[in-house]
Amino acid sequence: MKQRERPCASCEKLRKQIGVLQENVDRLRDMVSKLADENAALKAENQALREKVSHLEERLDTNSSNSSKPPSQAVRRIGEPAVPS
């Protein structure tokens, strides 16, 4: 008896589906890699911004009573009296 030279139709269909699934997996891996890179960049930017905010908050909390600047040169918040009571 001679073997079939052509694979069965369902086998060909499965091979095509496997090919499509593999393409999807490859595409998703690329997306995950790009998102991981973007996430790392955003984390670094977030950390830098947190440090900047912290530094600016420290500057806002400085006044003539806890710095070497005289009251006329001290940074004040809006509505804060010129001389602390």
Image (cartoon, grey):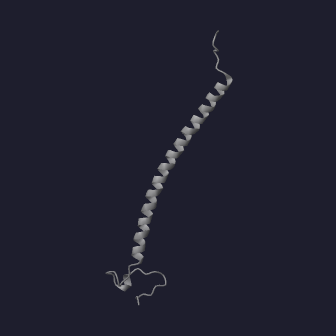
Instruction: Point out the residue furthest to the left here.
Output: 68
Residue 58 higher or lower than 16, as above or below: below
Q: Which residue corresponds to the image point at 52% horizontal and 46% vertical from the top-left? A: 32
Against 68, residue 21 (above or below) is: above
Which quarter of the picture shows residue 15? Answer: top right
Identified at 37% across, 85% down, the residue is 71
Looking at the picture, does residue 48 appear above or below residue 80? above
| Image x and y of residue 28, in percent | 55, 42
Q: Residue furthest front?
A: 1
Q: Which quadrant is home to the C terminus?
A: bottom left
Residue 62 location, x and y as percent? Answer: 38, 79
Q: Is residue 16 above or below residue 62?
A: above
Instruction: State which quadrant residue 47 falls in.
Output: bottom left
Is residue 50 toward the left or the right of residue 12 in the image?
left
Name the spot of residue 4 as percent of width and height, x first: 64, 15
Q: Position of residue 75 (x, y in %)?
A: 41, 79
Q: Residue furthest top?
A: 1
> What residue is shown at x 47% (from left), y 49% (from top)?
37
- Looking at this view, is 45 or 10 the one in front? 10
* Residue that appears at 42% across and 73% down: 57
Q: Split into 4 quadrants, where in the image is the N terminus?
A: top right
Give the camera-side residue of 3 and 47.
3
Residue at far right of view: 9
